[in-house]
Image: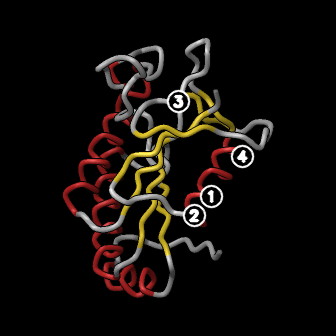
Amino acid sequence: MTALALDASISTRLLCVTRAHDAVVLSVRSQTTRPEGIVAVTQRVATAARRSGRRLVVVGGAGPLQVPGTTTLAIDDPRYVPSAALPAASASIRQLSALREVGGEWVYFAPPARFKPGPRRGTYATADGDLVVDSDGASSISMEDFAIALVDELEAPGPSQRVVAVGQR
């Protein structure tokens, strides 16, 4: 695997780079990018990936995930998305909508509500669109274990145009 940092505002460069790789991973930090910028970058990268016929894995946010056993989205549950995180969570919902509009072969790879550096346990759980929670209702994973899940998705891709939630049980 080769990591490459790229200015996503240059469409022709995006197309060249996506054609040169088997898959593209997009991860945009909400702390350094205004939430509206996340959606624009996602649209540009998704369009380039679709035009080049490449798989796109977008590291998104927990906002659009459904709270297990309910019809509530994580963004609407303050246990999982505190008010300070609402702008980023809202951007993650719009980011997922942008992927659906652009089409192509994509996977929205969503971390749990609590996503920080920590000890690597070497295990993780996934769910299709539902927030992954443990028996106490907590939703968390270390960045190290999330990275393992991401690499596993790249090496053994599942179906496209789906939301994969990752966390610890």
Q: Which mark is residue 156?
A: 2
Dot 2: few (<14), some (14–19), or many (≥20) neighbours within 10 Å? few
| Residue sticking out furthest to the left | 101
Residue 28 appears at what percent x and percent y?
47, 54
Residue 63 appears at what percent x and percent y?
38, 33
Q: Is residue 54 above or below residue 63?
A: below
C-alpha separation, residue under disc 4 versus residue under disc 3: 16 Å
| Residue sticking out furthest to the top | 136
C-alpha separation, residue under disc 2 versus residue under disc 4: 19 Å
| Three-letter residue code for mark 1 | Asp
Which badge, 2 or 3, comes first in the chain's sequence? 3
Query: Quick one: quadrant of the C terminus?
Result: top right
Q: Nearer the viewer, mark 1 or mark 4?
A: 1
Element carrying mark 3: loop
Picture quarter containing residue 53? bottom left
Q: Is residue 139 left or right of residue 76?
A: right
